[in-house]
Image (spheres, rainbow, N blue to C red):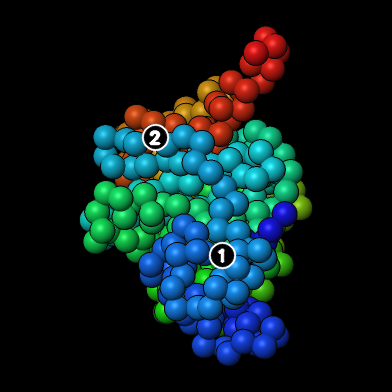
């Protein structure tokens, strides 16, 4: 199977050309065709010799995933279900805000973290995505936007789709270097956020990368018992060790960190829990922000419901009174399969039903 060209960083491409006896400036030319002109076929390249274009086409592919389906919400949110070359399905979401267009990308096929409220973890991880497969999600979304409006561009990225990004660390970092490159998509590092459920070793590694990419930690509970009940990863990566890693990150980078907190009715949304959360992060409040997220119900997790608005407001107000910076995430795509993994799980159920019926 051919390798995805999108998995190559700019320096990787320079090495590829020079190792084959070509000038290094060819990398700049190819980068321009890939990310500025956004070609669909290598044959569209006009400023390279035909033999070189043929060599590129024989070695690399521009397509490792196909659009299986696409849903568009009333608010402009677009959800893509992609089928990979090996038949696996992944999801990518485009969200439109006043400040720009943000894409949520997937990093793995399935997820091993085991959050009990999440649709993306309904099936265990079968493999990591390559850097090229992650970049190509952005390219597909950008090309879809090009068809609607030539002026609209992907301005922000959140790495919060299916999978645990820090469990696919090397490919994640290659992806970040590609999309952040000033000569290509030029998506600013401060416009990119990587979310982790709490892979402690990788938080230390990420702090040492010396990059401006934002970090978010999926916390969802202020103590070990509550967090372990809803996130099995907490057994191996307990809160006290997680907070030590967060402290190192804050000291090393002096960058603000975001704590993601999904509010589950009657589980983690009480005023007492808010006070406990405030106590947990009080020494970090100058460089932290709590993102309160209304739960998006998942058919397979009927034990969870979205917190009542009164509870959400009380939780928010309690944190604010304790001096904790926080906000409530605005729901998007509520009229489509907006929760991470929902569209994929529905399609897989359909395919299994077809197999059973013999169709």
Q: Residue at x 46, y 41 (%)?
A: 80
Residues 321 and 61: in front is: 61
Q: What residue is shown with label 2?
A: 71
Name of the residue lying farthest toward the top = 357
Instruction: Kindly identify which numbered label has been placed on residue 6.
Output: 1
Inspect this view and state whether residue 345 appears: yes
Q: Residue at x 60, y 64 (%)?
A: 57
Can you say which quadrant of the picture contains the C terminus?
A: top right
Q: Disc 2 or 1, which lies upstream in sequence?
A: 1
Name of the residue lying farthest toward the front = 50
Q: Quadrant of residue 287?
A: bottom left
Image coordinates for residue 324, horizontal then vertical, percent? 39, 60
Can you say which quadrant of the picture contains the N terminus?
A: bottom right
Measured Cα–Cα span from mark 2 to mark 1 = 25 Å
Q: Secondary structure at mark 1?
A: helix
Labels 2 & 1 near each other (Cβ < 8 A): no
Q: Quadrant of residue 354?
A: top right
Image coordinates for residue 82, horizontal then vertical, percent? 54, 42
Q: Secondary structure at mark 2?
A: strand
Vertical side of 272 occupied by 100: above or below: below
Inspect this view and state whether residue 190 appears: no
Q: Residue at x 62, y 87 (%)?
A: 22
Instruction: Kindly identify which numbered label has been placed on residue 123.
Output: none
Label 1 Cα neighbours within 10 Å, binned few <14 / some 14-19 / many ≥20: many
Image coordinates for residue 346, horizontal then vertical, percent? 55, 26
Residues 293 and 270: in front is: 293
Vertical side of 64 occupied by 310: above or below: above
Label 2 Cα neighbours within 10 Å, binned few <14 / some 14-19 / many ≥20: some
Image coordinates for residue 14, horizontal then vertical, percent? 60, 84
Closer to viewer: mark 2 or mark 1: 1
Residues 65 and 46: in front is: 46
Q: Residue at x 58, y 40 (%)?
A: 83
């Amino acid at each position: 199977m051919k390798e995805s060209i999108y998995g190559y960083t700019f320096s990787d491409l320079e090495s590829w050309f020079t190792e084959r006896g070509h000038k290094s400036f060819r990398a700049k030319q190819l980068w321009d065709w890939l990310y500025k002109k956004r070609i669909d076929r290598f044959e569209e390249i006009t400023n390279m010799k035909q033999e070189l274009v043929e060599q590129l086409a024989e070695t690399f592919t521009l397509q490792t995933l196909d659009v299986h389906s696409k849903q568009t919400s009333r608010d402009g949110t677009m959800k893509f279900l992609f089928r990979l070359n090996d038949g696996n399905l992944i999801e990518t979401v485009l969200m439109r805000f006043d400040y720009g267009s943000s894409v949520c990308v997937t990093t793995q096929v399935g997820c091993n973290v085991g959050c009990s409220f999440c649709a993306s973890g309904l099936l265990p991880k079968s493999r990591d995505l390559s850097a090229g497969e992650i970049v190509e999600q952005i390219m597909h979304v950008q090309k879809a936007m090009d068809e609607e409006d030539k002026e609209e561009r992907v301005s922000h990225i959140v790495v919060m789709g299916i999978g645990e990004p820090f469990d696919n660390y090397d490919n994640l970092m290659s992806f970040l270097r590609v999309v952040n490159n000033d000569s290509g998509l030029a998506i600013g590092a401060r416009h990119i956020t990587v979310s982790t459920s709490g892979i402690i070793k990788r938080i230390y590694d990420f702090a040492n990368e010396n990059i401006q990419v934002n970090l978010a930690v999926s916390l969802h509970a202020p103590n070990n018992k509550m967090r372990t009940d809803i996130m099995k990863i907490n057994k191996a990566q307990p809160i006290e060790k997680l907070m030590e890693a967060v402290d190192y990150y804050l000291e090393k980078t002096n960058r603000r960190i975001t704590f993601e907190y999904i509010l589950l009715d009657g589980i983690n949304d009480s005023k007492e829990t808010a006070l406990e959360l405030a106590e947990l992060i009080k020494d970090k409040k100058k460089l932290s922000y709590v993102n309160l997220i209304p739960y998006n119900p998942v058919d397979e997790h009927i034990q969870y419901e979205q917190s009542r608005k009164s509870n959400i407001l009380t939780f928010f107000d309690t944190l604010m009174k304790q001096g904790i910076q926080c906000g409530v995430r605005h729901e998007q795509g509520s009229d489509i399969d907006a929760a991470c993994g929902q569209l994929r799980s529905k399609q897989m159920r359909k395919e299994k039903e077809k197999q059973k019926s013999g169709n």
